[in-house]
Image (cartoon, rainbow, N blue to C red):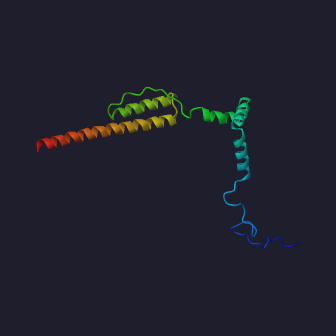
Amino acid sequence: MPDQTTSATPAVRGRPFAKGNGGRRPGSKNQSTLIVQALSNGDKEGLVRKALEIATAGNVPMLTFFLSRILPRERVIAIDLPNMESADDAVEALGAITSAVCEGKITTGEAAQLAALVNSYSRAIDMTDLVKRIDALEARINGSE
C-alpha cells in the first residue's frame, strides 16, 4: 500500500493570482453591481410597478419589503401618566409605566423608552430646582454683605 501524504506544495500567502495577473483593477465594479445599475438607469418606475404587482399577487418577501418601508417603525401609545411637577413624581410615573406593561398595553421596549423620558424630565426638574436654590442663596449672601 503506497504512503498517502499531502502534496509538498506549501500554501502561498498573499496574492492568489499567478505572476503578472494582478486581479481586478481598483475601482472596477462586479457583475451584479453593473446589472443593478443598468436596470435602475432604465425604467425605475416600471421596476417599482412590477415589484408592487408581485407583492400584491401574494409574494410575501416582496410584501414585507414594501411594508417595512411604508409603515412607521414605532406605534403611537396612549397611557395615563401623572403630572410631574417635582422629581418625586417620577416614582409614580414609573409605577404607571410598569402597570401598563403588566396589563399588556405597552411592550417592555416602549416602557424602557418611556422610563428614560421620565428619568430625563425628572433630572431637568432637579436641575431647575437646584438653580433656583443657588440663586436664592446667592441673593441672600449678596444682600447680607
List the single residue furthest toward the right: 1
List the single residue furthest toward the left: 145
Residue 6, placed above or below residue 72: below
Question: What percent of the width, then of the height, locates residue 41?
Answer: 70, 43
Residue 23, placed above or below residue 143: below
Of 119 and 33, the residue lying toward us: 33
Question: What percent of the width, then of the height, locates residue 47?
Answer: 71, 37
List the single residue furthest toward the front: 42
Residue in view at x 70 percent, y 54 percent: 29
Which of the image's four quarters has the C terminus? top left
User: Which image quarter: residue 71?
Assistant: top right
Residue in view at x 41 percent, y 28 percent: 81
Residue in view at x 16 percent, y 40 percent: 140
Which of the image's four quarters has the N terminus? bottom right
Residue 37, placed above or below residue 121: below
Of 93 and 31, the residue lying toward us: 31
Q: Is residue 102 left or right of residue 12?
A: left
Q: Is residue 112 left or right of residue 59?
A: left
User: Which image quarter: residue 95?
Assistant: top left
Q: Is residue 70 left or right of residue 76?
A: right
User: Which image quarter: residue 22?
Assistant: bottom right
Question: What percent of the width, then of the height, locates residue 137?
Answer: 19, 41
Question: What percent of the width, then of the height, locates residue 143?
Answer: 13, 41
Q: How many callouts does the rendering have?
A: 0
